[in-house]
Amino acid sequence: MKRLENKTVFITGGLSGIGKACAIMAAMEGANVAAVDLKSADTDAAMAAIKKHNPKAIFIECNVADFGQVAAAVEKTVSTFGTLEVALNNAGIGGKPNKVGDMAEQEWLTVINVNLNGVFNCMKHQLVQMAKQKSGVIVNMSSILGKVGFATSSHYAAAKHGVIGLTQTAALEYAAEGIRINAICPGFIDTPLLAKGGITNHPEVAQHIVGLHPMKRLGSADEIANGFFFLACDESSFMTGSALEIDGGYLAI
């Protein structure tokens, strides 16, 4: 029995990296997947990889920083599949590294608008639907930098700290309504986001980042997808308001 059989799973940032791995896993487990993301040259290939496991999967173009676009994406998902059982709010950007005193206002706002406001926008509309159903699971993608600082990444760390606070607060508000809300805190994961941020394609930088993890390697998107799957399923039925660390020991140092 596939554990997400006929359930609707809404995933932002669902066409690359962690989001794509989670979307493929959900489809493999029988879920109807709404992959919510910006359109790119990789859209068709990513959707083909998801639809290979469930042809009913759909792509919804959406900028999570836009409140109206998110409302429309959730409405499209529910109108297509009828329900919304699981949501993964994963879309995020790295942002330009800079010290706080040197950071331009727009650099700050761009990261906050996607990584924090984007999660609020999604939860706002997801929770309305889930409250009607009296059930649902939301997983928000935070980070190890949602628990500690990282020089030159104040915008990213502040947003990811905010995601954990938002997760915990909403979990308290909706626990009695049958809705569970948790977060995941990945370490540095080998995804296109790291390459875009100039980490994995610069050997010295990559070696430094790898060395911050006691396991002496980067994580994989599939390893984070395993954590998402656990939180999405009944095996985690007594978990809400938690921030699951999948970080190769980073936070244990």
Image: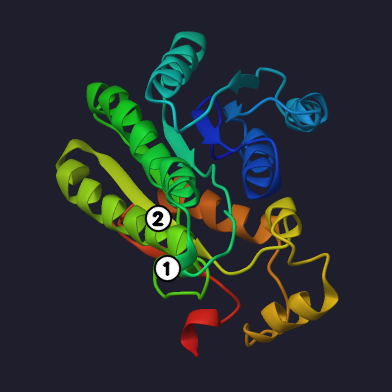
Residue drawn where x is 68% and y is 41% of the image: 20
Q: Quadrant of residue 97?
A: bottom right
On the image, numbered disc 1 is attached to which residue? 101
Residue drawn where x is 48% and y is 86% of the image: 252
Residue drawn where x is 74% and y is 28% of the image: 40
Residue 17, percent across and down? 69, 48
Residue 88, percent across and down? 48, 41
On the image, numbered disc 2 is attached to which residue? 159
Crowd rating for badge 2 (residues with CA inside 10 Å; few <14, some 14–19, many 20+): many
Q: Quadrant of residue 16?
A: top right
Residue placed most toward the observer, 55 or 190: 190
Left or right of residue 226, residue 208 in this image: right
Q: Check the image and report above or below for 156 versus 166.
A: below
- SS for callout 1: helix
Q: CA distance from mark 2 to mark 1?
A: 17 Å
**Quick one: quadrant of the N terminus?**
top right
Colour basis = rainbow
Crowd rating for badge 1 (residues with CA inside 10 Å; few <14, some 14–19, many 20+): few
Eye-nearest disc, 2 or 1: 1
Q: Residue furthest top?
A: 79
Mark drawn on residue 87: none
Identify the amino acid type marked 2: Ala
Residue 243, percent across and down? 38, 63
Q: Check the image and report above or below for 251 versus 200.
A: below
Residue drawn where x is 51% and y is 31% of the image: 9
Identify the amino acid type marked 1: Gly
Q: Quadrant of residue 208?
A: bottom right
Left or right of residue 113, residue 25 in this image: right
Q: Check the image and report above or below for 128 versus 108.
A: above
Q: Earlier in the sequence, mark 2 or mark 1?
A: 1
- SS for callout 2: helix
